[in-house]
Amino acid sequence: MLLPPELAFLAPLLRSPREEYKSAAWLISDFDSTIWQYSFDYKKAPKELDWNVPLSDGSSLLDEKNRDTLLGFKYFLTCSTRNESDTGETNDLKGQQARQFWRACHIIDFLLINDSRYQIFKYGLAGLTGGNLIELLDTLSKNTSISESAYSWTPTLREYCYTLLKETDDSRIFETLKARPQLMILTNEQKDEDELGIPFDLIPPIRACLYLNDMYGSPQVDYGIQPNTIRLSQVLYPQCLWGRTQPKTVHSVLGFNDDTSMFTREYAGVPAHTGTNTIMRDQTYFDYRSSLYNLGTLLEIGLPAPQISALVEADAYTPKLGVKGRFRTVPSDTVFKSIRHAIEFHIEHGEEIIKGFCRIALECQKRGVAPSTLSEAEVKSIVGPYLVNLGVSQLSLSSRIIDTKTLRESIKGNKEEYFIKLRNNVGLYDLLAAYVGGIQLTVGVLMARRVSELYTLKANKCLSECGDWLYFRNAKSSKHLFGHRRSEARPIEPIARDMIKNLIKMQKILLRIGYIKSYHTLFALPQMRGNRGLVDSGNAAYNRNLDIFCDYFEMPVNALGQRWYLRQHQMRRFFAMLFFYCGSFSSLDTLRWMLGHTDIKHVWNYLTESTEGAILASAAAQHAAENIHIGNTENFKELVELIKEHYQTENYTLIATSELEDYISDLMSEGMVEIEPEFFTDADGTHMKIVSRLKYKEAA
């Protein structure tokens, strides 16, 4: 129907579903193309889906006899990113739409992998029964990794390794191991973390086979040279639409050490969650189930699809699922000590560390060379006497040049040697990473923002002109904004502001001397192996800096030999914890100094305005639990009565702090208890104490 211009906006509503569903915001190619190009706002070139997929009877998905199945899969994909409530698409292209698309691709691949059993080549999608769909959902739910549940990645890779070993001539394997002896080395970390299940004595020859078949990636990553999982997937999953071009889980035991040591942390980390799921989480499963139900859209279009009864049967199925774990509580004193280390490190050495790196950048810019070409003697002469006296003698513990300018066999050396050097300040870049990690920690604790909001901060746009406000993009604000994040501002404490200004100053200098062409993210750092320029911070780099900081200052190790490697999601509530902690000891001077406030009521107002209610409540529950556990119950009398009644004991040291915290959090979420400061004034001024109040005695 041809509409007048003033009614053109009605055109999409008048098109048939068969025509309307041929388009999607991410689809670049024509719907009928045999190779689809798509993009979810990718920075690089669009990606491709090749519909020329072989089926188990030897035919191709593109063959005329499979046309309905091909169209069914295509429409299933384009419909997967549409809202359930209307025909429109969700507005978050890079987030929600991309995840919906991936889930639909996983379902298509599972059906293609099991084509011979389901006989899709013969009966099409209409032949799928309720039992088939339930089997699909049940299989996906068995593992938190879709690589394992949908693609059986580990057993498939293991079988491929055995086959490769059997088919490769022994003499070629021997020659390869002789030429590349690094292939024969297995580290203790690789053995401890192995999940591939191949006997260790077979790993070197299997590595040689993979090497001979050009299955190793390039360039080397920080943790060694690893098999290229995309290249492997192209061999192992020819019958898949999506999985044959996507990366899979890396099995580090197959990696080898070419010129860097394969470790990134001194100890294993304390798990971030209180429980680790081995099966799919409930919300993830419900998302897959909802995606599978979208196959019913094909009936609206007039294409063969599973019967409605089969879809309804599958939609009612719920297997045993994992539940979302609670973020593990980091002991208060651990975080307080880490903040102290970070602030003292900034005050004592921050400016000199930045100056030292800028001197390196200036010298390299003058010479037109990469920092990795500098010898240790040259580094010491450039960075200045302050850093040399501090211990700096190398560009980086991961750089490749020594005084003779020859390549090293192993850069980091053994684990013990590396971390001794790290704490002795031998590597400038490692020292810089520890410093930036301390800034990340301080800003993260004091601002209580999400990690993605912090690592995306832009150096030239994150502070107001007066320096009192931090600008960021709210990570949970894209709804109805077409995928864009809402910009917000929050007041920032003086110490965090000073740290941020030091990083901004570094980039201003680098920009002025021409070492970088434009501003980067605030926490951008040089590449640890000595390449020119800066590398923008992302989630991995952000966490690496925190890890280096925690190892540098030797964060506590628990009885299991695990270190507290701090993460932003654990630290969001600790500024509130600092308030409760200082308030309980009437020692708010440090907090006032950080905030620039003199009135403790202003401090509380700042907290309630800048921190989410759930985070404040969580911090209050932790504070109460830690105090009650050690017997400080004076300010929590009514709460203690509830705890005594619930646990049938007055010996609170018998109850784990984490268990107490969970119970108190439940009481607060049910509205039975509140924990807040109580302010009072005497001759010495305004003071406060943290108290609990029973809100609903009837409910209790």
Image: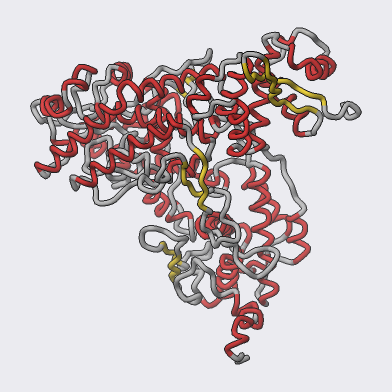
Q: Is residue 519 visible?
A: yes
Considering only vertical position in the picture, is 220 above or below 269? Answer: below
Q: How has the structure been colored for display?
A: secondary structure
Residue 114 can be seen, yes or no: no
Task: Locate residue 31, reporting x and y percent.
Answer: 50, 75
Q: Position of residue 266 (x, y in %)?
A: 39, 21
Whether 621 is drawn above or below 146: the answer is: above
Q: Nearer the viewer, residue 616 or 174?
A: 616
Q: How many marks?
A: 0
Q: Horizontally, is 443 left or right of 275 in the view?
A: left
**Residue 691 location, quadrant:** top right
Q: Residue at x 41, y 20 (%)?
A: 341
For the N terminus, give its image quadrant.
Answer: bottom right
218 relative to 546, above or below = below
Q: Residue at x 79, y 15 (%)?
A: 637
Above or below, 176 relative to 218: above
Residue at the (13%, 33%) spot, across then down? 374
**Can you say which quadrant of the picture contains the C terminus?**
top right
Front residue of 537 and 249: 537
